[in-house]
Amino acid sequence: MVEEIVVEGYNALLECLNEKQGSVLFVLFSGSLDENGVSWCPDCVAADPVIKRNLDKAPADSVFIHCHVGPREYWKDQNNEFRKDPKLFIKCVPTLLRFGSTGNKGMGSERVKRWSKTRSVFRNGLFKNKVAIVTGGGTGIGKGITKELLFLGCNVMIASRNNNKLDTGAKEIKEWLRNTGHHATLETLPCNIRKEEEIQNLMSHTLEKFGQIDFVVNNGGGQFISRAEDIRLKGWNAVVETNLTGTFLMCREAYKHWMKDNGGAIVNIIVDMWKGFPIMSHSGAARAGVDNLTKSLALEWVHSGVRINSVAPGSSIYSDTAAANYGDVNIFEENKKTVPYHRLGTVEEISSLVCFLLSPGATFITGETVRADAGQSHYACPTLKIPPHSKIPPYSWQNGAVDPED
């Protein structure tokens, strides 16, 4: 049952918000007590369909606060803490606030104000008490996926072979968790996904910490820009081992350690390589392998209740990490020209798709690769402009046919 708390004034509200961080469903500013010293909050709750709907759907541990100070007092009081720092609401109230007027006795004059800067399209608590491993979860797309999972109540273990990036990303995410009042747990572990024993340790460590592994997001990977003729065998092997072999090992060990007996969901992150991947052919070959691996494992492990899908972000998904890796933001600006939307994609447009594929709403989906590229993969090849040339002449009977009698 939702806990209802009545407070008088802004100081009491602030104390209550700090005490109940992460559990507050919404705050109703009821205005002052009426002329008879009675709050109209109960009448408002009974009459307001939005409030009733939120209360009916709210998790059992949610909190609903009645604050007996109305909007007029809010704007008149120049010293109240919320006017000094509006982010106090952002930090404490994830859903909505409703304002009323005592003159209307709470009957339909309320207006909704949305304050949270971080808002998943999915319901609060969707992944409560679930556990996910996200490789490469401290930067770029991986960090976005990690934050949305945490926002939805999932405990997350992020892994990366780069300790500095892991520590920096974890520090930022944990600060964000504190500021937004969410109580899901974030843990980290250095792990090179090219090394079998380190992946096995990652699985064991996650089980020791959380007792289960419900989701795995294979986001860790890497490549470098090079024409095929300039790629050395060492560089080729490094990219293929990271993107293909590492993904296989993560899937296999998650299955053997937990999912074989308990089920689960896996999402592999690949790339837009549907027309080839010029100047990064090593990565294109590896990611195409992951696309096929996804299909194979989805069928091999379906009897264990394991679903496996892939997401292929377009080359136009911008993140600071990707820009730093390629060393030139202009790469993304050039990509805009080949994106039907005429804009870059956001990390959240990938994280929400990943969360959907992990969710119960995707129960009937397995073995699929979903492209998230604004149609770019159907439009043009974004990574290469081919210069004018005549090295491959047209075929015709006159200049290209072979006489069968020769």
Image (cartoon, rainbow, N blue to C red):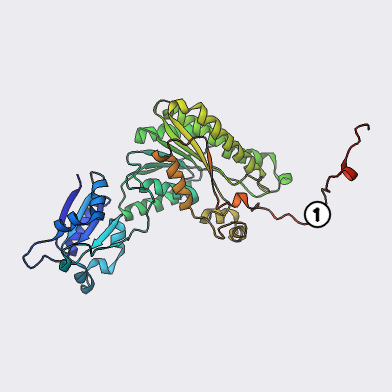
- Pointer 1 local density, CA inside 10 Å: few below 14, some 14–19, many at least 20: few
Name the residue nearer the viewer: 221 or 170: 221
- Would you name the residue on which mark 1 appears? 389
Residue 143 locus on image (x, y percent): 45, 49
The residue tagged with tag 1: helix, strand or loop?
loop
> Outermost residue toward the right?
406
274, 135: nearer the viewer: 274
Along the viewing direction, whichever of 104 and 165 lies nearer the viewer: 104
Q: What is the quadrant of the C terminus in the image? A: top right
Q: Is residue 180 left or right of residue 4?
A: right
Q: Position of residue 37 (x, y in %)?
A: 7, 64
Picture quarter with the N terminus: top left
Amino acid found under the numbered disc labelled 1:
His
**To which quarter of the image does residue 203 belong?**
top left
- Report whether 397 appears left or right of 176: right
Residue 166 visible here:
no
Identity of the residue drawn at 38% across and 38% down: 131
Q: Which is nearer the eye, 335 or 147?
A: 335
